[in-house]
Amino acid sequence: MDTIFTTNLVTTKSGTIQLCDIEVNPVYLEEWNERATSDFKVLAKDDAILRNTLYRIGGMSSGEVGETKYCTLLKYTEALYDTSFIKKIYPQLNSEQVKKKRKHLAYTQTIIDKHGNEVATADEHKYLYLVDGNSCIYSMDKVYYNIETGFRYGSTSNSMSSDDFLFIDNAFDKDVKMRGIIKINKWDGTWDIFTKK
């Protein structure tokens, strides 16, 4: 992983986490069959890369690195396609070519805190939605969670928001005690439930 980057890093704000442009070593990109993406970034602080992880800003990204308490980014990791999948798509390839073709950079959406830590990562092919860049609440697949504690509030396709609160209609939760309208404080994650009598 030490040979991923080919340019020197330049940060602009001292003491803060930043998302910086980076040039990725073309040999590395070739090895991992990445030809389409050229806008990779890294997290850095004071002219030092925090970790050798490639990120991108996706269309569903929210929050601002170093500006809000949380933000979402696309995180790229080295991965392998299933051999049978490659053979099905490329039946003409020999076994050595199949082995090479399996390599790719897979992405998942991840939530980064203001210190640059990865605090939540989406399941494969799913997306995380921050209620607000400064809120500790996010959802994935219509299920709401607390970033800081991992607490699962409930699942809904109906929600409303005010300046300070998120209201979710959790009418069909498996846990009968959690069925009702849940009022969640966006900033500290505390909650109340209003159940049907």
Image: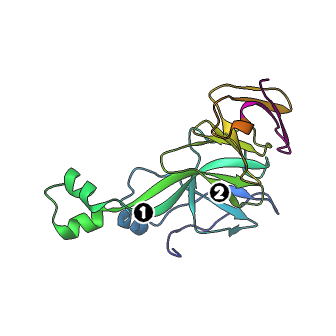
Mark linked to residue 38 = none
Disc nearest the viewer among 1 and 2: 1
Q: Quadrant of residue 137?
A: top right
Q: Going 20% across and 52% down the picture, which residue do you hit?
A: 88
| 7 shown above or below 154 | below
Mark linked to residue 20 = 2
Picture coordinates of residue 29, whole percent (x, y): 41, 63
From the viewer's side, name the closer residue of 187 and 53. 187
Residue tagged 1: 79
Q: Going 39% across and 57% down the picture, which residue do you hit?
A: 34
From the viewer's side, name the closer residue of 52 and 187. 187
Picture coordinates of residue 27, whole percent (x, y): 39, 68
In the visual, does 122 lie left or right of 104?
right
Picture coordinates of residue 161, whole percent (x, y): 77, 27
Which image quarter holds the C terminus?
top right
Q: Is mark 2 on a helix, strand or loop?
A: strand
Real-space Cα distance between discs 1 and 2?
A: 24 Å
From the viewer's side, name the closer residue of 84 and 191. 191
Q: Going 49% across and 53% down the picture, which residue do you hit?
A: 107
Please tell me whether residue 131 belongs to the stretch shown in magenta.
no
| 124 shown above or below 7 | above
Q: Identity of the amino acid at label 2?
A: Cys
Residue interval drawn in magenta: 179-197
| 177 shown above or below 118 | above
**Residue extending furthest toward the left:** 92
